[in-house]
Image (cartoon, rainbow, N blue to C red):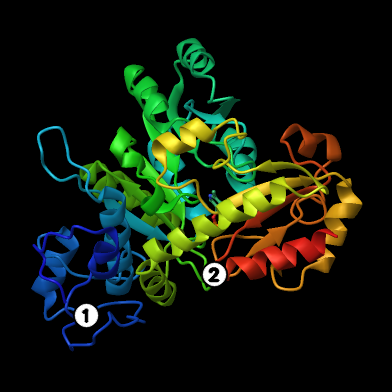
Amino acid sequence: MADKDFPMSGFSSLAIHGGHEQDPRYSHLTPIYAASTFVFDDAEQGMRRFSGKEPGFIYSRWGNPTMAEAEEKIAAMECFGIKHPGGAKMEAKGILHASGMAAITSLLLSTLRTGDKVLSHFSLYGGTQEMMDRILPDLGMAAVITDLRDLSKAEDVLKADPSIRLIYLETPANPTIQCVDIEALTALGKKHGKTVACDNTFATPYLQQPFKYGVDFIVHSTTKFLNGHGTSIGGVLLGRDIEFMNARATKVHRLLGGNANPFDAFLLINGMKTLEIRMERHCSNAMDVAHFLEKRDAVAKVNYNGLSSHPDNATARKQMRHPGAMLSFELKGGLDAGISLMNNLKLCTRTVSLGTCDTLLCHPASMTHYGVPREDRLRYGITDGLIRMSVGMENIEDILTDLGQALK
Ligand SMILES: Cc1ncc(COP(=O)(O)O)c(C=O)c1O
């Protein structure tokens, strides 16, 4: 086990050792603490634990040793190498949730009050979009959606509507892979006294660290690249204001009951240890796939923020280590071509979700967005022949061979 004060100079060292504590029974890895509740030596210890005077676990909806290691590891990765202006190391607290949506719900309900609004971009993960459109209004809250890539428009909206309390970013965004400028939007938010949150699911802390730019909260669907193997659903809410996280955010999380569980936390901890090498391979494969697809006659357009043709290439280059492993492309043949490509795949996997070792392809028009009226999905850029791809870690020759034969 690494010493607590060992100065981790590399991201992988931190990803492997961060958050780990020696198990009292000397297990090499933190075990799956499959316990709903924890015992007290005596009533006085119970009192001290409930009053917060003594650290210790009480009940697994409130916290659990396996979940705590995952929380600390993600918080350490999101703060890796970041210092406050005075030179002190940045710290954050993470709260593990049952899913990315549970973490987003805790974020919204702990930061917003009745009458408040959240400002966001028009390209967002569908679940987040629906939460803003269908759930927030019933609670007397609302979303204002604009193109956050247009900073002067964003500032006009902020000036016009003082009830906006939270700016919610997702970059790169699902499913369009659009990027918004975290630094510029956070500066704008701070100028107008707003709280800023960022969904960092597509990038992961290895590629992008929103806390560097002063973002207040980060959310993740840990289901994706952080877990990396498609073995569990999970989410995390991270905040730099430790007092707020320990008080309001913890209260909301505990009372909503969207807690994670020790088994999924164990899978997540072990997945995260290889984040750096996985992301390096995912991203180099994605770049090769993007160049390959650009040259195919059947492909009308490739949306990958690593290509200079992508409108958000400069933003991606500014704030991401590599442009990521998510891309989408449009087939000239529309719906039929999309269905045919999906059916012709021999190596890559036909499925929704993203961030696993294998390459995943999804045809939104026949899958995730099958039930969405065509005009509505076209408005969000989801055309009949659009294919979304999470580029995996197979040997690149095999991915390209499969795509080549499936496109014929
Ligand atoms: C960017 C993004 N955020 C949040 C979520 C929701 O995460 P979960 O499915 O773990 O609830 C997803 C799911 O795909 C996502 O892609």
Q: Nearer the viewer, mark 1 or mark 2?
A: 2
Residue on which the image places disc 1: 39
Confirm if mark 2 falls within 8 A of ligand 1: no
Q: Position of residue 330 (x, y in %)?
A: 77, 44
- For label 2, the crowd category at 10 Å Cα-Cα, with few meaning under 14, some 14 to 19 and many 20 or more, is some
Q: Position of residue 16 (x, y in %)?
A: 28, 69
Residue on which the image places disc 2: 357
Q: Is residue 238 left or right of residue 3?
A: right
Residue located at (67% from left, 48% from top): 328
Q: Count the marks: how many?
A: 2
* Image quadrant in which the N terminus is located: bottom left
Considering the numbered disc 1 on the image, is that residue within a helix, a strand or a loop? loop
Residue located at (79% from left, 36% from top): 378
Q: Is residue 145 visible?
A: yes
Judge by depth and name the residue closer to the eye, 330 or 32. 330
Q: Position of residue 112 (x, y in %)?
A: 43, 34
Q: Is residue 321 left or right of residue 13?
A: right
Q: Which tag, 1 or 2, sits closer to the chain's start?
A: 1
Residue located at (75% from left, 41% from top): 382
Considering the numbered disc 2 on the image, is that residue within a helix, a strand or a loop? loop
Residue located at (31% from left, 77% from top): 37
* Image quadrant in which the C terminus is located: bottom right
Q: Amino acid at mark 1?
A: Val
Q: Is residue 270 left or right of residue 152?
A: left
Judge by depth and name the residue closer to the eye, 266 or 247. 266
Q: Amino acid at mark 2?
A: Cys
Q: Is residue 202 left or right of residue 10?
A: right
Rendered position, 408 above or below 83: below
